Amino acid sequence: MPTTIQIKRVYEPASDDDGYRVLVDRLWPRGVAKDELPFDTWRKDLAPSGALRTWFGHDPKKFKQFARQYRAELAEQQAAARELIDQAAGRTLTLLYAAKDPTHNHATVLRDHLEKLVNA
């Protein structure tokens, strides 16, 4: 189990306290070369579906409904979520995302979902 789960934009520098760094976007982040992003794994399977991501469009007014629909998608990915938790194995788990809004993004929903699994 991870010691903590945190989120961080891919554009922020990596730090020693990031632990296990996981990219959780469905698409590769714009402006970031694949060999320049320090990460341990890319879990597209835990990102929102393409249709949901497109519908949301990072509109804060749609965030509540987006979060509800994304949680429903995550409910279908329990095995993948548990596998990610196991991979962090005692380290900090850092979920990397590219969205500009630090509050209204899928990584916040995923973090909350994973924390519930850890504390269940």
Image (spheres, rainbow, N blue to C red):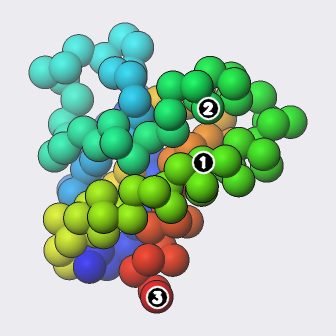
Q: Where residue 41 appears, x then y in whole percent?
A: 19, 44
Q: Earlier in the sequence, mark 3 or mark 1?
A: 1
Q: Position of residue 36 (x, y in %)?
A: 18, 23
Asked whether residue 65 is in view, the answer is yes
Q: Are marks 1 and 2 in contact (CB under 8 Å)?
A: yes
Assign a secondary structure to mark 3: loop
Q: Is residue 111 left or right of residue 85?
A: right
Q: Amino acid at mark 2?
A: Leu
N-terminal of the pair, mark 1 or mark 2, is: 2
At a point 23% along the width and 64% down the height, the residue shown is 83
Please tell me whether residue 43 is drawn above or below residue 18 in the rendered image. above
Q: Can you identify the residue that label 1 sits on?
A: 70
92 in relation to 54, above or below: below
**Crowd tier of the residue under label 1, counting other residues whose Cα lies within 10 Å: few below 14, some 14–19, many 20 or above:** many
Checking the image for residue 120, the label placed there is 3
- Distance Cα–Cα, label 3 vs label 1: 20 Å
Q: What's the mark number on residue 88?
A: none
From this viewpoint, which residue is outermost toward the front? 76
Separation of disc 1 and disc 2 at Cα?
Answer: 8 Å
Q: Residues within 10 Å of mark 3 (few under 14, many from 20)?
A: few
In the image, what residue type sits under mark 3? Ala
Please report whichever mark, 3 or 2, sits nearer to the chain's N-terminal start: 2
**Which residue is at the front of the view, 78 or 26?**
78
